[in-house]
Image: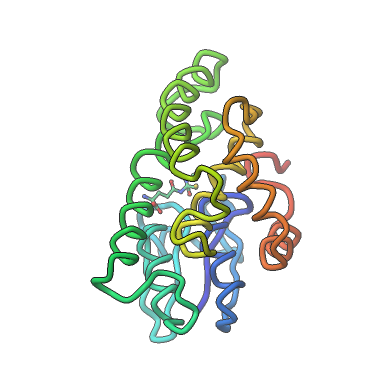
Amino acid sequence: MKLFYASGASSLAVHILLEESSLKYGLEKVNLDTKTWNNSDYNLINSKSYVPALELDNGEILTECAVILEYVAHKVPAQNLIGEYGSTTYWQQRTWLNYIATELHKNFISPFRAGNWLPNTAESKELVYKRVFPRLKFIDKQLGQKEYLVNNRFSVSDTYLFVMTNWLQRLEYGFDDLENLQRFDTNMRKRFAVQNVLQQEGKPHSLQE
Ligand SMILES: N[C@@H](CCC(=O)N[C@@H](CS)C(=O)NCC(=O)O)C(=O)O
């Protein structure tokens, strides 16, 4: 499998999950400004023109972060990253993945990026905050004193949530009133896989020259 990613983008969730899964995978860095990878046209890989995309061993391309996460998690059933299809745990995971994808990820898209739904202004930053913060607050409450989202053990949904808490800091919103999420973020950063992946990806794509 090969992951097409941009540093610090939503592809980070898939990168972390792949690293945690111990599956064999390769990486291809995408330049989102030029939509190229390795001097080739990225739109030929994913005509939706965004990351993540996962190339499977048979050459097929999988897109949509939550779907790729679910695919990877099912590849290693023994690790119980998503639960057995149809189980209560599985539906809880699906609910979180969908919630993060639809209520957080797209609302959280950085106004720094040209072509995103808001121009890069202070007002935009405030608008993003107003949309995103109540949803983060909901998650903070659901998390309570737990360390992880589902069954209090590390799973697929935590990787996606971590991208959101990472963006919270990158966009300089901070963790005011979100103590549980702050603790979640700190705990995630203690995991070896998360540390490896953050080091490997380096500076976020929107902050690169
Ligand atoms: N619906 C897609 C959205 C993916 C997405 O928005 N990716 C962003 C990075 S987080 C991207 O590549 N945007 C294109 C760009 O910034 O040029 C998914 O869930 O995977």
> Up-down: is 205 above or below 156?
above
Residue 103 appears left or right of 146: left
Q: Residue, x 51% and y 51% (percent of image)?
A: 10
Residue 136 appears left or right of 61: right
Quarter occupied by the C terminus: top right
Q: Residue lying furthest front in this view?
A: 145
Q: Position of residue 67 (x, y in %)?
A: 35, 63
> Up-down: is 98 above or below 38?
above
Q: Position of residue 199 (x, y in %)?
A: 76, 59
Residue 85: quarter of image: bottom left
Q: Nearer the viewer, residue 66 or 144?
A: 144
Give the colour scheme shown: rainbow
Q: Position of residue 104 (x, y in %)?
A: 42, 39
Q: Residue, x 41% and y 52% (percent of image)?
A: 49
Q: Nearer the viewer, residue 164 or 26?
A: 164
Q: Residue, x 44% and y 24% (percent of image)?
A: 118
> Up-down: is 142 above or below 116?
below
Residue 151 appears left or right of 23: left
Q: Residue lying furthest left in this view?
A: 86
> Up-down: is 105 above or below 52?
above
Q: Nearer the viewer, residue 20 or 4?
A: 20
